[in-house]
Amino acid sequence: MGEEVISNIEEGICWITLNRPEKLNAITPSMLEEIQKAIKSVEVDDDVRCVIITGAGERAFSAGLDISMVRGFSREEALELSRRGHSTFLSIMGLPKPTIAAVNGYALGGGCELALACDLRIASQNARFGQPEIGLGLIPGWGATLLLPRIVGHTRAKELIMTGRLIDAEEALRIGLINRVVQAEKLIPETKELASTLANGPSTALAEAKRLLNSQLKCEEALEAEAEAFGGLFCTEDFREGVSAFLERRRPVFRRPTPA
């Protein structure tokens, strides 16, 4: 098995690539650690002035958390998984250098949250975005309950999270989820061009702009509340049914509330 997260530096730009194309770049706990390790390395490397995060292959940026690995998780394990994701994505948000998500194909669940953690998002025409966790009897666990309403507004965020609906690149652009839509073959060149512009900009001013814009987010308390709710849902019958249905490729049948 090759590296699941690849990091390389080119002309002042660090490219971080999720490298599980056969699994639609689904994210494992070890990949979260590798992403954070790459970000920490970039932070102390003065030669790197911008970061691009993307996915290997043409089908997906990332389909999100690898559900097959967490089916039997306890509440405590799920809580730790959520906190692990928060730590990784906060390191991206706290990096005093610009970050860009180059979204090719699916950006779902944790994959969408990874894109949300970046400063800017450029998507190919075939990109699809969504937070489909509700179909598993879950909620987003890596920051979408905080970041998505901040980016697209509460009304749209509630619809996307509560219905699990997927949206295409044009709708994502229209609601402000992404910055640009480009043809698939132009995704990497145009992302590189934007990254080069940022890399050649005033690094201290860019860092201050990012710090001040992100300082308006009350992160810690909101993310811990998300983690607690995410972990608690792993104990429910609905979650067990949702994951079973997902892995068995069938429609879930969730429990109806018992009348009072």
Image (tube, helix red, strand yellow):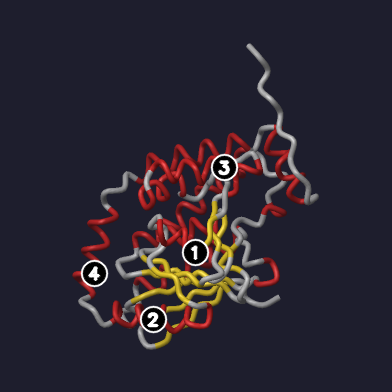
Residue labelled with disc 4: 206
Q: SS for tag 3? A: helix
Q: Which residue is tagged 3?
A: 163
| Mark 3 → mark 2, Cα distance in angstroms | 37 Å
Badge 3 local density, few (<14 within 10 Å), some, or many (20+)?
some
Question: Residue at 71% across / 33% down in the picture?
Answer: 254
Distance from Cα at disc 2 to Cα at disc 1: 25 Å
Q: Nearer the viewer, mark 3 or mark 4?
A: 3
Of badges 2 and 1, nearer the viewer stands: 1
Residue 127 location, quadrant: bottom right
> Mark 2 is on which residue type?
Ile
- Mark positioned earlier in the residue sequence (3 or 1): 3
Q: Amino acid at mark 3?
A: Thr
**Disc 3 from disc 1: Cα separation:** 18 Å
Under mark 4, the amino acid is: Leu
Q: How many marks?
A: 4
Residue 90 placement (x, y as % from top left) = 40, 56
The x, y position of residue 109, in whole percent, is 56, 53
> Between 35 and 237, which is closer to the camera in this rendering?
237
Alpha carbon separation for disc pair 1 and 4? 27 Å
Q: Please say if 215 is above or below 115.
A: above
Of badges 3 and 2, nearer the viewer stands: 3
* Dot 2 alpha-carbon crowd within 10 angstroms: few under 14, some 14 to 19, many 20 or more: many
Disc 1 marks which residue?
Answer: 169
Residue assigned mark 2:
13
Q: Which element is circle 1 on?
A: helix
Please, is residue 236 above or below residue 151 in the view? above
Looking at the image, which residue sits at the far right? 248
Q: Residue furthest bottom?
A: 11
